[in-house]
Amino acid sequence: MASKRPVVLYGASGFSGRLVAEYLREYNVPFIAAGRNKTKIQDVMNHVPGIETADYERAEVANTVDELASLFTGAKVVCNTVGPFIYYGPTVVEACLRAGCHYVDISGEQAWHRDLAEKWGEKFAAKGLLLAPAMAFMSAPSDVAARMCMEAANIDTLEILTMFDGIPTFGSTQTIFAVIQTEGYYLEQNRYKTWTRAKGYEVVVPGYIRTQLALSWGGFPHPVWYKNHPQVANVRSFGGLLNRQIMEGVLATEKNFEETIRPLPKEEQERKLAEMANAVQSGTPPRENSREQRTIDVVVGRGSTDFVQCVLFGTCCYRQTGLMQAYAAHSLTLGPPRQTGFASPAAAFGHRELLRALEGHGLSKARLTT
Ligand SMILES: NC(=O)c1ccc[n+]([C@@H]2O[C@H](COP(=O)([O-])OP(=O)(O)OC[C@H]3O[C@@H](n4cnc5c(N)ncnc54)[C@H](OP(=O)(O)O)[C@@H]3O)[C@@H](O)[C@H]2O)c1
């Protein structure tokens, strides 16, 4: 198996998958473009700019532990872009562990992160493997910004906001609806506290006169990353689209879910949420435009006497996602991660390194205020 390509990109036919492929090609990382439909994968790969110079092959694989593990065996890294991860993630992680590969994904669902930290982190660590979900726009750049704040000031409290302009893909819309059923937590004195369900928050976003509407959206991964952190004790994370109409729609759905769907059995809840997501988005959005699809991450840090703010002004959230996956895969093909087992993107790859990758591609820029 020595000649096997070192990276498996699972979900290569998706909107995010094709962007990961684009950046893997830029980093000259040979990869296997895998998914459930080989014809669709080839069709999507044919539209990746410059793909003719990439070293890749296609693989059709069923979403079972046995088939995935057999495909992964001999590779070094699995980049998983098949979500919602609370539904499809466990099979891929189990296969990855069995095959002895590092695992990175583009999830943002806190419930998935809690599951990974509690059930899988030690098993990956025992094999010297990395388990790093959320190598994606939501929430890797804000992880970088949080660490910039911790470096700059004596703080123990973080408030984190991630907002973006854009058209959510089919998979993203499914995930936005899927997380509604999950419990979201923030961190208070290193203890999980439950977010109030179906509640919106007016947020102040640098660069905008009007306030924006954000949600706790299942809690985000940061509270899981800082649960046992010796410096940071309190973490609240919010986010959403820079589009009030869409956010009001999501909030209305959350309220409707609490009143009419939560009393139903779990399978029925999932079915209804998927139906609602299908009604909102069924197609693939156009390629992002850096003059239109802007992003912003705001992290505010507070200690007893210190204050710090780090803002990342960025663009093209899906491209940021593609870049960070490829950066992770590239790094892992060259050497070990900074940490094994369950780790945040910045803990695994370094916050300054990730920021340099984003800034170097013109996708984000940090501003720090103390
Ligand atoms: N955290 C972040 O910043 C971030 C950013 C981007 C995306 N995401 C998440 O990543 C996931 C994918 O997003 P996307 O934008 O790439 O969506 P997408 O364009 O709809 O692509 C979804 C991919 O998953 C595959 N897939 C779906 N169900 C599957 C199943 N049952 N078995 C095997 N493959 C399956 C699809 O295969 P087919 O083509 O064969 O249908 C496709 O390759 C979503 O959960 C989204 O929320 C997160």
Image (spheres, rainbow, N blue to C red):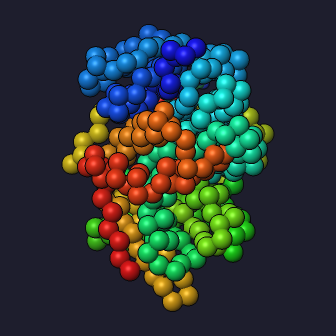
Left or right position of 367 against 306? left
- x, y percent for residue 58: 46, 13
Q: Residue at x 60, y 17 (%)?
A: 71
Nearest the eye: 57 or 15: 57
Q: Is residue 206 placed above or below 72 in the rendered structure?
A: below
Q: Residue at x 45, y 57 (%)?
A: 351
Left or right position of 5 against 120? left
Could you tell me if residue 125 is visible in this image?
yes
Q: Residue at x 67, y 40 (%)?
A: 128
- x, y percent for residue 112: 65, 45
Nearest the eye: 268 or 310: 310
Q: Is residue 213 placed above or below 349 in the rendered structure?
A: below
Left or right position of 222 against 245? right
Could you tell me if residue 220 is visible in this image?
no
Q: Is residue 146 placed above or below 334 in the rendered structure?
A: below
- x, y percent for residue 306: 48, 85
Left or right position of 21 against 195? left
Instruction: Name the residue furthest left.
Output: 291
Classify the position of the C terminus by image quarter. Answer: bottom left
- x, y percent for residue 364: 31, 54
Nearest the eye: 26 or 139: 26
Instruction: Name the residue furthest bottom.
Output: 305
Q: Is residue 274 placed above or below 136 in the rendered structure?
A: above
Q: Residue at x 45, y 82 (%)?
A: 307
Classify the position of the N terminus by image quarter. Answer: top right
Nearest the eye: 30 or 59: 30
Figure disc tally:
0
